[in-house]
Amino acid sequence: MKRPHVRSGLCLFLPVLAWVACSGCVAASYVIQLADGQFAVNGNVEPIDSVLASGQLSEQDAAKLRLIVLARDYAANTIGLNAGDAYTTFYDTQGDPLAWNLSAARRDALVPKTWRFPIAGEFPYLTFFDEPFLRQTEQDLLNAGYDTFSYELDAYSTLGVFADPVRSPMLQRDPLSLVETIIHELLHNTVWRASQTTFNESLATFVGRQGAVDFLQVTFGDASGWPEFATKFYADNDAVNAFLMQLYADLDAYFAQPLTSDEKVAGRDAVYQAARDRFSAQVQPTLNYPDVFGGYAGLPTNNAWVLGNHRYNLDLGVFAAVYSANGDNWPATLEVFRAAAAAPGDPVAYLRDWVAAHSAP
């Protein structure tokens, strides 16, 4: 099931090079495919201006590429994100997939499988450019008793190490998702906390969403219909996220019971089925665009899938409260987010304390 949220990843190329020096041939095989894939991207980019002038794109794709240019400029000049040379070039995959992300989790608990890298820290997913290697790694994890969740990437951030290009699969997105994705990825270049993937991804989700709404309002105005559509769509997102947070809480309570691991695995589908039924009966009928989110009625019995959604959508209300307390001023809001990322301890706890200190009495 494809979810209608931004999915991104990180290319851990440089951290993995350090890891390979001390971790042996398994790490070497991973870094080789990662390096090959990243260098293939880096070596085959074209300036966006040249691509648009060449006429090689359809009219629709050319319009989306121009929209990306506008969104990138807005992200850099109005929001204040570190764009550098990102999204000034174009990489055509020639119809092939760009890359994949893979995550895994215990079947008897909401505990992710993680991988640790020098510099970048701990991550609950890996990026692959080589699909056979991805599938073998995924099968090894399944054989070891994990749930797995893999999906194609059309965008990922190198945290400013490389000038990330627009990748051709991104043009399959609708304009709202496209703008959100550009802002989401550029946030990663701007605010980052090692070993805090949920903070990093959820913060990027908030900034991407709010930034997209602001951009569409400023760029196209109410008459275009885009601001209204975005507001309604993200209201649906919020309702679905609340449903998924409840599923997470229900599963967490279920797995906390004094049962054996086998008993927990055997009985967990009842929790998932109750969630499927609740979504169909109570959530989907209330949505503005119920068909867009209909796949959640068939959500998989898969803890890795649940954790994948969770890490992109946690504490969005806290980030929104910081933005509101700053008078919807992006540069001031980013300074608070940077301070949270740099502070010792939990960055979200830092933000909660900041909001409490800056709220009107």
Image: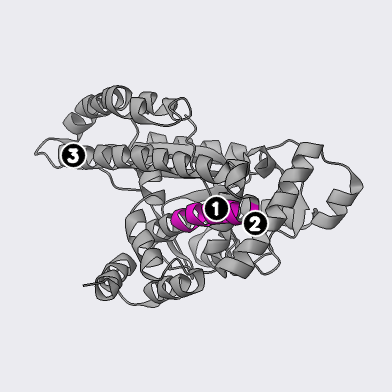
Determine if the magenta segment contains residue 164. no
Please give the name of the residue rendered at 27% of the width and 44% of the height, measured from the top-left corner: 110
Between marks 2 and 1, how big is the CA–CA gap?
A: 8 Å
Which residue is most to the front? 223
| Side of 67 relative to 258 (left or right) | right
Between marks 3 and 1, how big is the CA–CA gap?
A: 38 Å
Task: Give the x, y percent position of residue 320.
Answer: 38, 59
Predominant SS along the magenta part:
helix
The residue where tag 2 is placed is 71
Instruction: Tell me the magenta residue range.
Output: 205-219
Within 10 angstroms of label 3, few (less than 14), some, or many (20 or more) residues?
many
Please say if 251 is above or below 116.
above
Which one is nearer the viewer's eye here, 331 or 32? 331
> SS for tag 2?
helix
Which dot marks residue 212? Answer: 1
* Kind of residue at badge 1: Ala
Task: Give the x, y percent position of residue 351.
Answer: 32, 69
Which dot marks residue 105? Answer: none
Q: Earlier in the sequence, mark 3 or mark 1?
A: 1
Q: Dividing the picture into quarters, in which one does residue 80 lie?
A: bottom right
Please give the name of the residue rendered at 53% of the width and 49% of the height, measured from the top-left corner: 8
* Kind of residue at badge 2: Ala
